[in-house]
Amino acid sequence: MKESLPKIITSTVPGPKAESILKRRDAAVPKALCGTIYPVVIDKGEGAVFQDVDGNIFLDWIGGVGVLNAGYSDPRIVDAVQKQAERYFHTIFNIVAHEGYIELAEKLNAIMPCRGDEKRTYFANSGAECDENAIKVAKAYTRRSNVICFTGAFHGRTNLTMALTAKKSYALGMGPFPAGIYRAPYPYMYRAPKGYTEEEAIEYYLEGLKKVFDEGAPANEVACIILEPLQGEGGFIPAPIEWVKAVRKICDENGIVMIADEVQCGNCRTGKYFASEYWKEAGAAPDIITTAKSLGAGVPISAITGSAEIMDAAIPGTIGGTYCGNPLACASALKTMEIMQEEDYAGKARHIGELVNKKMHEMQDKYEVIGDVRGLGAMIGIEFVKDRETKEPATELVSKLIAAAFKKGLLIEGAGTYNNVIRFLAPLTMTDEQTKRGLEIFEEALLEVM
């Protein structure tokens, strides 16, 4: 099935079986989890496609929102988890160590592009958990309490990470939030002040960060600055390297820990194993890197990596947890890393990215509604506007595009502050034929809704 093309065989979507199951869902699950955008129920999945309970085949360009870089159900990863399950399911690492945890930490220490000749890694269960733990470590190391995040940021749904997350639709009615969180403008270059050169725009955004020190928290009271190398929920916006270098310099001058949130953009998605490799090549490596999502190919696990000096500052008892570094998750992550390295998944991302970028730029030339195409590797954002001059967001068009593509067997998802960006996060196992057909469906759906 992994090489199948999308195919809808039912007269309606959802089909009868899926519709019946979704009614059961609505009766059993909180309304907040019962969305209507994707009325689909999976039966099985392979590679970049899945089959629903009615026999329809969908090409998945959402990939579990970045979880399925290695695709659905790689039999080698399945086998690794099964073999571990035959030995033992669980041990809490703080009490009974297991070798899988240690081996995975060693492998991540060897490849993580953060500062430090000697590194330390420990594990949590989700993206929000690893971001929150990275901040805990930064506070322990600096003995400071304030945190700077950015506009457009998404860091999770715990109380602390909801405070960090910019879009407050993810935090409605959930406050109050922790004190000591300050927000600076992220360099959204497509929407920089009109008429600015790239250099002027970068300086404009840097001045916005420096204002936080004057109007929010003095620099010597800031524990860390947390940012995504390529913003996900914010609209797939890459951080300009010159801006990153300047932020690194600000951190160095003021003793601030720089945290790169690679929850979504890590694990080969951007054409490097970790996007922070681009920063390291420019001499601006972060102090701590967090990652999750595709680390375990779908089994919940996240990682926090930094220099030994920083990581060892955490006081015993302040980090860790019952399920952190679960043996099944470590087994999945170890096999996933092995496959990604041996089969050059970063190269796969670059190849897919080239194909998708080429077609999206061709469409941008043809259709005025496409304002911007941007990203790194196979993490690409397509921003839709009503008018290229005013850049007014085409939010309604994007909603209709998602629905039209779904009916044709292609799953795509929106993003961005204005919900006017389509994010491309297809599994890196996607074949060229599937990529071509997906791009055809995308254009067909766009023409339909235009």
Image (spheres, rainbow, N blue to C red):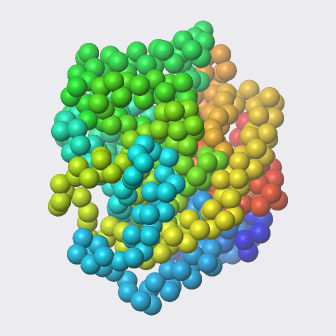
Which quadrant of the figure contains the N terminus? Answer: bottom right
- In this image, 128 relative to 145: left or right? right
Q: Can you give x and y, in whole percent of width and height, for residue 306 in the image? A: 37, 49
Is residue 77 visible in the rendered image? The answer is yes
Which quadrant of the figure contains the C terminus? Answer: top right
How many marks overall?
0
Instruction: Determine the residue positioned at 49% across, 29% down.
Output: 244
- In this image, 292 relative to 409: left or right? left
Vertical side of 144 occupied by 50: above or below: below
Q: Can you give x and y, in whole percent of width and height, for residue 27 in the image? A: 38, 70
Instruction: Determine the residue positioned at 63% across, 62% down.
Output: 341
Is residue 175 visible in the rendered image? The answer is no
Q: Can you give x and y, in whole percent of width and height, for residue 171 in the image? A: 31, 44
In the displayed image of the protein, which residue is found farthest to the front?
Answer: 117
Q: Can you give x and y, in whole percent of width and height, for residue 150 in the image? A: 39, 31
In the displayed image of the protein, which residue is found farthest to the top?
Answer: 195
Q: Which of 14 and 264 is in front in this view?
A: 264
Vertical side of 71 occupied by 347: above or below: above
Instruction: Determine the residue positioned at 23% across, 38% down.
Output: 142
Instruction: Determine the residue positioned at 69% across, 64% down.
Output: 343
